Amino acid sequence: MRSTTRREVVAAATATALTASVPPAWGRLLSRRARVGPGRFSDGVASGEPSPTAVTLWSRLRTDRPRSGARLIVATDPGLRRVVATAVVPTGRGVDHTVKARIGGLKPYTEYFYGWESGTHSSPIGRTRTMPAPDSAVPLRIAFSSCQHYAFGHYSPHFNAAGETLDLYLFLGDYVYERARREALYPGRSDPIDANDLGSYRRKYRRYRSDLGLRELHRLHPAVHIWDDHEVENNYSDNAPAPSPLQRTAGYRAAFEWLPRLVFPRDRHRIYKKIPLGATADVFLLDERQYRTGSADGRPRHILGETQMNWLIDGLRTSTARWKLIAQQVCVTQNPFGDGPRRDMWDGYPEDRARLLGEIERAGIQNVVFLTGDAHVFMCNLLASDFESLGDGSTRTPAAVEYVGGSVTSQGIDQPETVVQAQAPWNRQYNGREHGYALLSLDQDRLVTEYRRSDLSNPRGATLPFERFTQLSGTNNIGRESLGAPPPA
């Protein structure tokens, strides 16, 4: 039997009932009378923000035309023969020629495949999946990472994660680094781009997305992204000095353009939201940069802002999922490196930290887990509104557990674990030498977190697990298993 041609796939797709919608921001910036034009899909494909019945699909059309369009095809098979949805999606210079559509009417916890067509080129075939139905207690596998400085190494952690069986991937900030670094640690990894306006931020994302490992990760797994500081400027929320509103807006806009993320119609820069994963987990995505106050602005110190803080506390109280996963940017723990408070982290906002953890304790909310980026180290911490109570030998149950998932490439603070624990006895593991990502396996009974380290000198460098933590439901504590040979002293 002969194989189906791409022309036949397109013909079948155009006969399918339309169940796709273009995000409102795209509709305002672009013509609604989209037509498929010429161009190439050289920046890969991506899917994100999945729900039980919908997912957002992304690509970018490289074309000289100021306005154009591309055809999206969604199917239940990798050959795109069993088509379930199609749309012609507009694009243009106003959105850096990215194409984005939200596909609805899908089946819960189901694998789908998709591709984009221009008049002259076809994209790689992407794979994605919807999330479990609200009453489904299926086990889940979730990976997360942060801090992927292009010049500090190849994205071998991403290449490894692309080959895993995952339900969701979380990018916890510093997806790009705004400053140029022409002297790379490895050949071919230099980054000559200083980003401070819309054009340069867009070029920065093109540079980072040129990495095969990152493109494969996006092609094969649905993802969500929260920004930290380097998507705009290092520590920009410290107001020393503050970036201009134009620069901040440019950084935010480029992030929305280049990632498969929806825009809230009345709050276009809001990224905090909840991603439900059936009865097994809820993922709360935070924004710990945009709403900070108290740094050189004469206002009280807050890291989340009152609206976001109330939203998070209410969401934790009302969540019926077994695990409440808080995906966020900076270390919650006190004295994270054992060398004193870090003002840019939750240490700089102790009242907010005590309020949040105290509310969790007073409400008796079980199985709250913080997933953290930014620090460039692998770390595991027990959390409480009063940290000293965790180090006095008492049997107090912690309010939550924090897993800090290292960095993909960015360099960390390498020091002995014993040095950190001498000053921060609530620390349960520390490694500032390795780079990689974290993998969670969770069901109704337990959450298992595995830290993985990678060889960054090779685009497909070896990636191996080196720490494993088992957290039983209802305990807010961990059992630790160190895997393989320890790193050299």
Image: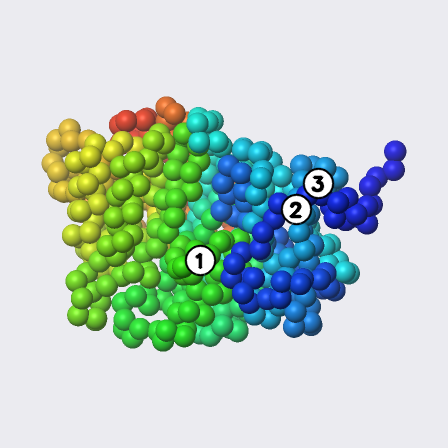
Q: Amino acid at mark 1?
A: Pro
Q: Is residue 247 left or right of residue 5?
A: left
Q: Secondary structure at mark 1?
A: loop
The colour scheme applied to this rendered structure is rainbow
Q: Which residue is identified by label 1? A: 265
The tag on residue 18 is 2
Q: Is residue 105 left or right of residue 471?
A: right
- Structural distance between the alpha carbons of marks 3 and 2: 11 Å
The tag on residue 83 is 3
For label 2, the crowd category at 10 Å Cα-Cα, with few meaning under 14, some 14 to 19 and many 20 or more, is some
Q: Position of residue 86 (x, y in %)?
A: 67, 48
Q: Secondary structure at mark 2?
A: loop
Q: Residue at x 62, y 45 (%)?
A: 19
- Quadrant of residue 109 within the rendered picture: top right
Q: Amino acid at mark 3?
A: Val
Observer-nearest of 187 and 199? 199
- Quadrant of residue 386 within the rendered picture: top left
Observer-nearest of 309 and 121? 309
Observer-nearest of 156 and 10? 10
Q: Amino acid at mark 2?
A: Leu
* Nearer to us: label 3 or label 1: 1
